[in-house]
């Protein structure tokens, strides 16, 4: 049986230089999510509501994920498991068109709430740090809770349509108190209590959600990670021909492929739906 390793130089293994103790986060539970979010209520900014009232249809022009607010709570009578509540805030851009195909730009907010159940183990340690930017200073570690991480890409707009009424559907999240980053994204302001016509948007969202905890590992080190290329200087950056020579020849633009991939990819669908 091998002896227990301790930090320091290693013997008996020529490739390994030493073993070091590293501080990182261990993932205890994770899941991937592919959500088709149907009929999210569109909260227009104050300048867009008149355009909705006079429109006969809508065109989608783009969507931006502004932020995701995440909260973690332990599950009663199920040790080590936690609910992760994630609230997604989206900035929706589109066009409202009238008879004669005259259009006006519309912009507004959409909100999506998601809850998942994940294993996050147990921990009672209280962690303090001198680094002000350390996320552990928020107190989540002091409460013994794991850290929830949500990784996403900007969603795909699948549908954007008008509604005769702006009344909320059952279970819709109400943006009563909007976070600061939402208010900054809409300088004109958002009016939750709409009067007149409303709109709904359907989005396709890809996400990875996981629970992590701080831990320490003993890591073998082979060598220092030195960059394999030299840093390029700034000379010649203003020469457009020099820049053009570094661009590869677009063969696929001149010679169409013999076969087409029938599986829709994320970038292709997103670009097509926002054109």
Image: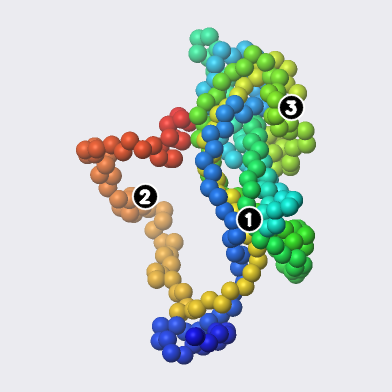
Q: Distance between the residues labelled 2 and 1?
A: 54 Å
Element type at mark 3: loop
Residue 241 visible in rendering? no
| Residue at the far front in the pictured view | 77
Q: What x and y, as percent, mark residue 250? A: 28, 44
Q: What residue would you read off at disc 2?
A: 240
Element type at mark 2: helix
Residue 240, above or below 232: above
Sequence-wise, the earlier of marks 1 and 3 is 1
Dividing the picture into quadrants, the one containing residue 6 is bottom right
Is residue 19 toward the left or the right of residue 107 in the image? Answer: left
Q: What x and y, as percent, mark residue 85? A: 68, 45
Q: What residue would you read off at disc 3?
A: 192
Q: How far apart are marks 2 and 3 (CA)?
A: 49 Å
Numbered disc total: 3
Q: Quadrant location of the C terminus?
A: top left
Sequence-wise, the earlier of marks 2 and 3 is 3
Dividing the picture into quadrants, the one containing residue 252 is top left
Q: Which of 94 and 21 is in front in this view?
A: 21
Residue 215, above or below 169: below
Q: What x and y, as percent, mark residue 42? A: 64, 27
At 59% from the left and 56% from the top, the residue drawn is 29
Is residue 190 toward the left or the right of residue 219 in the image? Answer: right
Q: Nearer the viewer, residue 228 or 150?
A: 150
Q: What x and y, as percent, mark residue 124? A: 75, 65
Task: Check the image and tell me how it is coloured.
Answer: rainbow
Mark 2 vs mark 1, foreground winner is 1
Question: In the drawing, what numbered circle is on residue 119?
Answer: 1
At 72% from the left and 50% from the top, the residue drawn is 75
């Amino acid at each position: 049986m091998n002896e227990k390793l301790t930090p320091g130089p290693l013997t008996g293994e020529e490739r390994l230089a030493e073993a070091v103790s590293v501080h990182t986060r261990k993932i205890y539970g994770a899941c991937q999510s592919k959500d088709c979010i149907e009929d999210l209520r569109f909260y227009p900014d104050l300048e867009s509501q008149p355009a909705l009232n006079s429109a006969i249809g809508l065109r989608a022009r783009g969507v931006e994920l502004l932020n995701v607010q995440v909260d973690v709570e332990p599950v009663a009578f199920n040790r080590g498991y936690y609910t992760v509540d994630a609230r997604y805030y989206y900035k929706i851009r589109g066009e409202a068109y009238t008879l004669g195909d005259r259009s006006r730009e519309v912009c507004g907010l959409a909100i999506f709430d998601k809850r998942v159940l994940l294993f996050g183990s147990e921990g009672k340690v209280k962690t303090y740090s001198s680094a002000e930017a350390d996320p552990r200073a928020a107190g989540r570690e002091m409460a013994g809770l794991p850290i929830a991480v949500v990784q996403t890409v900007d969603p795909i707009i699948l549908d954007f349509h008008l509604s005769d009424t702006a009344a909320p559907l059952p279970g819709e999240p109400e943006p009563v108190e909007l976070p600061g980053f939402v208010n900054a994204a809409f300088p004109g302001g958002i009016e939750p209590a709409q009067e007149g016509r409303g709109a709904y948007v359907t989005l396709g969202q890809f996400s990875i959600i996981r629970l992590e905890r701080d831990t320490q590992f003993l890591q073998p080190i082979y060598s220092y990670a030195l960059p394999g290329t030299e840093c390029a200087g700034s000379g010649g950056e203003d020469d457009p021909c020099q820049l053009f020579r570094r661009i590869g020849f677009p063969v696929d633009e001149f010679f169409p492929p013999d076969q087409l991939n029938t599986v829709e990819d994320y970038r292709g669908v997103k670009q097509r739906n926002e054109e």
